[in-house]
Amino acid sequence: MNRVHAPMRPRRHLLVLALILTAATLAAPTRADVLLEEHFDDSNLRARGWFDATNVDIVANDCVHGSCLRYHWNTGDVTPSGLGPLRIEFPATTVVYLRYHARYSANWRFRTAYGPHEIQFLTNADDRWIGPAETHLTAYVEHTEGRPTLTGQDTLNIDQARLNTDLTHTTERRGAHGCNGDADGYGVGDCYNAGSLHRNGKRWGDPGFAVFTSTPGRYFQGDWHDIIVEFRLNDVTSSSTKANGHVRYWFDGAPVVDIQDMVWRTGANPAMAFRELVVGTYYHDGAPEPQDWFIDELLLATDPNDVGLGFTGSFDAGRDGSNAGMPFDAGVPFDGSPASTEAGAAGIDGQRPGPAAPDTTAGCACGIGDGRSPSLTVAGTLLVFALAFVARARRRLLFRSLLLVLLVDLGCDGSTPTGAESPVPEAGSISNNAGASSDAGADARTDAESKGTDAAPGAGALPDAATECEHKKAEWIFCEDFEGPNFLSQWQEVAYPERKSLETDKSHVRAGKTALKLSFAPGSTDGAGWMHFWWTPAARQNDVFVRWYVQYSTGFDYGGWDVKLAGLGAHLPGVRYGPGAGNMPDGTWYASRLLSLGVTDKNSGANPKEPIFYYYHQGQGSQWGDFGPQNRTPSVRFNDNQWYCLEIGIKPNTVGLGDGEQTVWIDGVEKAKHSGIRWRTESAVQINDLFQSAWIGEPHAISEQYRWEDNYVISTSRIGCL
């Protein structure tokens, strides 16, 4: 018997529609938790509560919606067009969720090690006009080398009378971000002299990969990207500090940093709360060329739902951030569970991958999941469902037309909105600019390499040796080609800068237009001084390589002992220096560098002018470290006025085992390899320091002499020569 489906009565249709529309209305946000919503659609910022440097540049081209905020640097500018910070206050709160869209000009060059400053949060413990570097707490959101850099600083809390003293179990009146001990197990932080006082700084959750790169593709800095950050103050009493503060970061819908056991404040500041947002742009040492940074659709709230996050639990990145950056199938998860794809979970060569593809729901320029009003998603979806349901039941043209009109009006017609990213590959098909493992390409050794050519495993040819640093590989930590007037800007410590200059004579330039010229002052054991570049190692950093070029002037006198070259140092998190030469390593630090002797060493058999290892390790022969001579024939001696390509590779030992290694390649040919080294006793000890040295032990020269260096690269895989 055929069933007859009686049509639903019109009144029932109206009832269903009314119920669903009511639910949609109730689902719409109350906005009580929204602290700030800024679209930068016009320049009338003061009317909306902004103060300080409000004469900013509002542009109408290539924005997410309408207009957007642009900061422009000319060559040498520290602040964009001389502008100071843009500030706005909001109701005091102990938790902030910040969502904004950002992009950089295609030629933007990120700084290394620290900066440039971008966005800061200040608290009610300070005046509204205070400078961010000297406060009771400043929380920074910025991108160093294209990586998310989330930093805290509380300079005014430091006990300046007890610098570098651990006060964590002594008093609550102390700095939580450096100078007075490690408050949360994430390292002691920085403590540096700023003239009249010491400042501090501590960063969390470096994922080990860049989310903004100069390579067109998913992470291209010239495209708009959606960023969400959560800062939550930890709980305190007047006599105790609890390590339950939050530092979290999402990029295009994918979680990248998740730390929920850190310390922002101590018990000395129980009433502290975030109160002010500052767009405080600052490019240390000046921009290398004209470049721009854009911001649009900024939203600040205290509820994760208001910024498009549907959960507050952990996605289990781990204390060391080892799971950070796991790709998600559909952007920001709503249940807190990492629903990563099987292919995406492994990443490239076993290294954790970068962020997943942006949430495809953001493809509508309509307010449903577009970042402007993220919580309209539920209301919009229910409304569309209501009309679709009624249209199907009644089969009336009216309802179908309403549905079509609604979809078109909302902009969800499948087109990509202005400024939005074009469709990207599925999560898991992550390109190499998400990061590579420390042994990337280790099994891909070529015949060319085994025959001693310049080839390195996995190293592809560069388009132009002169532009090496413009084509940085994902596994590169640092690149310095000494081009331009700010040729020392990437180095955090520079001794005797007056003995360092740019060389333009092509016979002393390895690549590009200029090289570093080091002037050895006669009679000075400090020679041409030294420089340090420090970085925060990725959680799974293992082998590290450094490659550079060196050339000595005619008749260079190596003196009666040695001339130091560059090398690598390893320390515990937050530590930059070891105890120095003449100290036996205790397993919490180690170092290895190259040097050349001016005499023959009877113990190692090293000949004058041969580059050899000088290293500090567990079990060394004396307090002054060990020499590691070349052990591959024929050995290489430096000739005057000749460029040499030097590359060092350091393999840390497994804790408890003596399986560490060090290798040197000269002009692409392995010339020394030393195995069985016990570098460290703690796995937290990681390589974090490039130490460039031009020290000379017993100088004999009676006139100035020179050494030239060029094209430094630090990497987690073999680099090879140009």
Image (cartoon, rainbow, N blue to C red):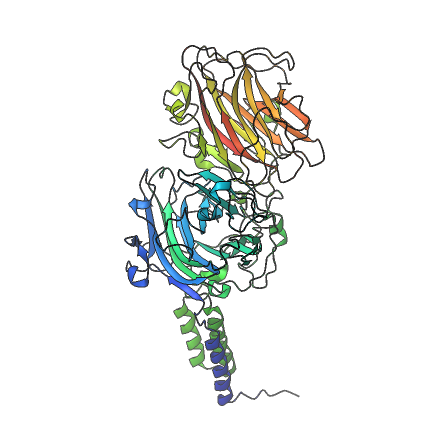
Question: At 48% across and 68% down in the image, what residue appears?
Answer: 377
**383 displayed left or right of 585:** left
Query: Would you say residue 171 is visible in this rendering?
Result: yes
Up/down of 221 relative to 14, above or below: above
Question: At 48% across and 41% down in the image, what residue appears?
Answer: 161
Residue 62, given in percent of the width and then of the height, sits at 35, 54
Residue 191, given in percent of the width and then of the height, sits at 49, 40
**125 displayed left or right of 579:** left
Quarter of the image where one finds residue 508: top left
Quarter of the image where one finds residue 652: top right
State which quarter of the image contains the N terminus: bottom right
The residue most toward the right is 657
Up/down of 567 relative to 139, above or below: above
Nearest the camera: 606 or 381? 606
Quarter of the image where one finds residue 255: bottom right
**Total label count?**
0
Residue 671, given in percent of the width and then of the height, sits at 61, 20
Nearest the camera: 462 or 284? 284
Query: Would you say residue 412 is visible in this rendering?
Result: no
Up/down of 89 relative to 543, above or below: below
Residue 307, given in percent of the width and then of the height, sits at 47, 62
